[in-house]
Image: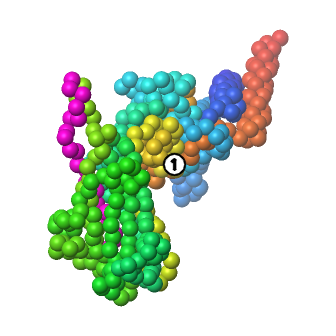
Amino acid sequence: MMRSLYSGVSGLQNHQTRMDVIGNNISNVNTTGFKRGRVNFQDMISQMMQGPARPGERVGGVNPQQVGLGMQVATIDTLHTQGSLQTTGVKSDLAIQGEGFFMLRAGDENYYTRAGAFGLDAQGNLVNPASGMRVQGWQAQTVDGQTMVNTSARVEDLVIPVGSKDPAQATSQVFLASNLNKNTPLIPEDATDAQILDGTWTAEYDIYDSFGNTHTLRIDFTRNPDAENQWIATTTLGPEGDEVIPQQLSVGGVDSVDGATFIIEFSNDGTLQSVQNAEGGLMNDDDLGVQVTFEVPRSSIPLDPETGLPVDEVQLQTFDLNLGRAGAFVDSMTQYASESSTKVFNQNGFTMGYLEDYRIDQSGIITGIYSNGNNRSLGQVALASFTNPGGLEKTGETNFQVSINSGLPDIAPVGVAGKGTVIAGALEMSNVDLSEQFTDMIVTQRGFQANSKTIQTADQLLQEVLTLKR
């Protein structure tokens, strides 16, 4: 009878523990990124009343006789199943679809969470605004003019410097891909203005100097009357100004004496064949183009604060005018019997701008949107995964810490080593299922009541024993 009393007590205590876990689950039903708990029971040790006996020649074997001494909690698991995603429309809100955790840092301590309700602080750090913990990732770096994110480096605080400057960049590459109509009429020597206009095709595009000033690049194409499949191209900078900006062309390292004219030759199939100038400069293989050098207008040259004079008497700037690849159709100059087109499909200069906005894509890459039209990578959010995520320790505020049974974090970008994708403008909700919790609550309540009845019945039996002496 005493055994049944203690068995009932263990049942009461452990069902109360299970009820505590259920109550915590229900209280966090609307907690962002919360992972529900689950209690598993196991029986306690059993008292041996009679041991087993093996079969003999005259009788068979005898099974052991054991009386159980109650039950105990086997595990309290944290179930890291996927929670549903709720759209918020807030660009700094992040959710993970699949495996992985966001990595946060407070001082020297690292924490891991699925709750991605992030925001910016006064210094532009991407943080959890509830705790101030900083989101970890890789900050973008600019190497040789190219912006890149090195995900093999150590993670660091992610900073989105809204309002910061993007310095002006001088144009160094211009890419042409126009088509010149094969049927364009030749311009006679005594041509009228109308004939000249009809026989000339013009392409215009804006380029930039090192101070961010805009200059118009105009290229006039006319058919060469002395050679088939050849066009004479003349470049002009700043045609809208009072004075045309002085310039010099170079083809294959040979400067043009006339300064701004070169010849484009096409093959019979309409693709580029060569580029040359009158001074013997020739390019007829791989990438074809000319090099343009011009004088930066004096209004763009900085002045010496002491003398008030320009720092440099003449400041030169050079860019490559790329015409395409020999024999190529795509993104190259062509000569077909169709309407001429003006297609300057790219140039790499821009004015100074300010970071006005940012976006985060499914790879966790943060892209800054600048007022000068540039979109530049600012960094990438890091994700961490664990061999045993159930072994992580809860530290409050929907955060986890590494334990001796969770394994070390595997920190990598989205999609590496089974990590999920990042969904911006959404949050992962709690994975608590209320219908399941209410069912478990009923079962737990019945178990608690049944164990209380065990104690009551054992007490009545003891009372009967005490009354035997009457």
What segment carries the magenta color? 306-331
411 sits left or right of 259 in the view: right
Q: Is residue 287 at least partly visible in the picture?
A: no
On the image, which quarter does residue 398 sit in?
Answer: top right
Amino acid at the residue labelled 1:
Asp
**Secondary structure of residue under mark 1:** loop
Q: Residue at x 45, y 71 (%)?
A: 193
Q: Is residue 207 above or below residue 409?
A: below
Give the quarter of the figure containing the N terminus.
Answer: top right
**Label 1, on which residue?**
361
- Compare residues 396 and 18 and report the one nearer the observer: 396
What secondary structure do most residues of the magenta stretch adopt? loop
- Compare residues 316 and 177 and report the one nearer the observer: 316
On the image, which quarter does residue 324 sit in?
Answer: bottom left
- Compare residues 251 and 58 and report the one nearer the observer: 251
Farthest top residue in view? 470
Q: Residue at x 48, y 23 (%)?
A: 122
Q: Residues within 10 Å of mark 1 (few under 14, many from 20)?
A: some
Q: Residue at x 57, y 39 (%)?
A: 91
Q: Is residue 94 above or below residue 182?
A: above
Q: Find residue 73 and report its horizontal and vertical position in percent.
A: 59, 33
Q: Find residue 391 and report its horizontal and vertical position in percent.
A: 47, 38
Q: Find residue 56 and report its horizontal and vertical position in percent.
A: 53, 56
Q: Is residue 144 above or below residue 399?
A: below
Q: Residue at x 48, y 41 (%)?
A: 371
